[in-house]
Image (spheres, rainbow, N blue to C red):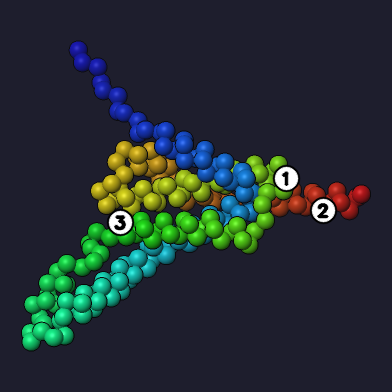
Amino acid sequence: MTLPTVPELPPLWPLVLTLAAAGTVGFRRGWVREVATLGLLLFSWVVVVGLGFSVVASLNKLALMLSFTWQGGFDEPDPAPLLRALRLAPAIDPWHPEWFYALLFALGIVGAYAVPNRVASRSETALDALLGGLAGALNGYVAAYVLLGYLQAGGRGGPIADGFSLLGGYATTIVVAVVAGAVGIAMLTSLRGAVFGQKR
């Protein structure tokens, strides 16, 4: 009698390490910076999804013109063969642009963490730090989920990406719930502080 096989769970250690590291960063930065970072991460994701193909087409055209000029296409009596060869070997594969999308989103991650540091204050209270840690863990998950998703689609990522796909179907719901909860708690805390300040 053969026992039924139990499916193996995807490795969770990359997910745990990412959440812990991002949560630690968020604990130091505070919830205001982390919520701003989350907004910029989602904006970067939307930009890559909505404009990624247009960016790839524009860069391929630019690379084509530069290569054609560099290889002396204007001096050729018949530049058609060279132009045809260059078009068959674009700088970025338009059918598989996942690596380029991952690079674009990685640049968005850098901007999403750099910009709030200049425009938002750091955590001032323990509650700010706690909410920052929760929002930071969520930011780490979103960044890793999107980035590894592109890498896996491009032939990389492997089992590490499987761990981040556990909550993939609920990512949007989790993001909205956490942001709404963080903002609600912060507003209640501010209102309570204002009331206490008036009583004193």
Q: Which residue matches tag 3?
A: 99
Q: Secondary structure at mark 3?
A: helix
Q: Nearer the viewer, residue 46 or 174?
A: 46
Q: Residues within 10 Å of mark 2 (few under 14, many from 20)?
A: few
What type is the residue that disc 2 sits on?
Answer: Ala
- Image location (x, y in percent) of residue 105: 41, 58
Q: Is residue 24 above or below residue 97?
A: above
Name the quarter where the N terminus is drawn: top left
Q: Which residue matches tag 2?
A: 194
What type is the residue that disc 3 sits on?
Answer: Trp
Q: Residue furthest top?
A: 1
Q: Secondary structure at mark 1?
A: loop
Question: Position of 104 compared to 192: left or right?
Answer: left
Question: Position of 61 compared to 181: left or right?
Answer: left
Measuring 38% from the left and 42% from the top, which residue is drawn there?
A: 165
Question: Position of 170 compared to 184: left or right?
Answer: left
Is residue 94 visible in the rendered image? The answer is no
Q: Earlier in the sequence, mark 1 or mark 3?
A: 3
Between marks 3 and 2, how big is the CA–CA gap? 49 Å
Q: Earlier in the sequence, mark 1 or mark 2?
A: 1
Between marks 1 and 3, how big is the CA–CA gap? 41 Å
Q: Earlier in the sequence, mark 3 or mark 2?
A: 3
- Image location (x, y in percent) of residue 104: 38, 61
Q: Which residue matches tag 1?
A: 125
